[in-house]
Image (cartoon, grey):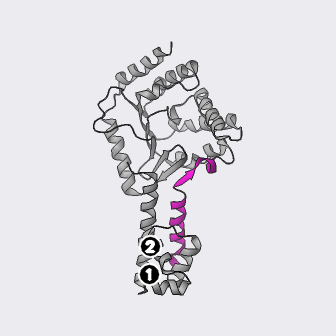
Amino acid sequence: MTSPSSSIQDARKNLGRRLCEIRLDTGLTKRALAALLGWHESKCSRLESGARGPSEADIRAWVAACGAAHLAEDLVSTARGIDGMYVEWRRMERSGLRRAQESVLPLWERTRRFRIYSSWLIPGPLQTAPYIEALLTSIRDRRGLHDDVREAVEVRVEKQHIAYEGNRRFAILLEESALRHRIGGAAVMAGQLGHLLSMASLPSVSLGIIPLDADRSGIWPVEGFFLFDDHTANVELVSAHLTITQKHELILYAKTFTDLSGLAVHGSAARELITAAGDSLA
């Protein structure tokens, strides 16, 4: 898989190439453009190579000097998108957990095809309220956040209506280990696993479980990710939330999902694994 840092670096390189094309179209050398802008030539080189991301002021000055001011807004929008690819949790959760939950609602509402892979947790659309509360309480305590867990739980539970409404499809893959991690204690997990069995029976949900004894020679567990239609992937990291929109990376995540699907069991075999995990709680 592509690392978060390389994702952002690729996007910066693409923007840098666009700036280079604009400069070349005007016949300016990097030295000449730098002189017009009052910059050192090395700054132009760093921006064009993607070694440094341009500020909005840098972009507007660049295109104005090249006689292409009409391109400024599109390039500024691209730069803002790059800056938004990698968002630290502390920044996203600055106003509390509820705000972080609400921020993704528009994306969820407009998505029709969800592909979700999780190697350590039951994912959001399949979670019970007690399971959500246990997760968010842990996050609140670990990150020292404002206590709005109850409100955040309500938002996440309300968000689950999308599994029952509209023409939406959910393909969900879980590592068997996600069934075994005791979030909230035995009673909470028992309820969660029972709910998982119920959700798996919905026509809109395809649930696959990758057994612990699956041969992982070809592909091993990776970071959990959500694919929203074919235009966005979200990846949850320890320190941050990564949003991916570049086509070649989306193709890579889609292929990874397909490859992981080949290891999963579905239907009665998946239900047997969930039931066994529930039985182990006793």
Find disc 2 in the rendering and name its residue.
48
Q: Is residue 166 left or right of residue 253?
A: right
Instruction: Categorize mark 2 by other alpha carbons within 10 Å: few (<14), some (14-19), many (20+).
Output: many
Disc 1 versus disc 2: distance between alpha carbons?
10 Å
Across and down, in percent, residue 104 comes to 57, 47
| Kind of residue at disc 1 | Arg
Please check the rendered image and state whether residue 83 is part of the magenta-colored stretch, yes or no. yes
User: Would residue 216 be found to the left or right of residue 70 on screen?
Assistant: left
Q: Is residue 245 visible?
A: no
Disc nearer the start of the sequence (1/2): 1
**Residue farthest top in this picture:** 282
Circle 1 residue = 23
Residue 76 within the segment the image draws in magenta: yes
Query: What span is in magenta?
Result: 68-94
Is 259 positioned to the left or the right of 67 in the image? left
- Of 78 and 229, the residue lying toward us: 78
Callout 2 amino acid: Glu
Residue at (36, 21) in percent of width and height: 268
- Residue 248: mark in rendering: none
Q: Residue furthest right?
A: 147
Residue 189 quadrant: top right
> Residue at 40% across / 77% down in the picture?
21
Residue 11 appears in the figure: yes
Residue drawn at the location 35% of the way across and 51% of the way down:
251
Q: Cβ–Cβ below 8 Å for labels 1 and 2?
A: yes
Depth check: give the residue in front, 191 or 31.
31
Report x, y in % for residue 195.
51, 24
In the rendered image, residue 54, in percent from the top left (x then y), is placed at 53, 70
Q: Can you say whether 223 is above or below 22 in the image?
A: above
The residue shown at (46%, 14%) is 279
Circle 2 sits in a helix, a strand or a loop, which is it?
Answer: helix
**Could you tell me what secondary structure mostly forms the magenta stretch?**
helix
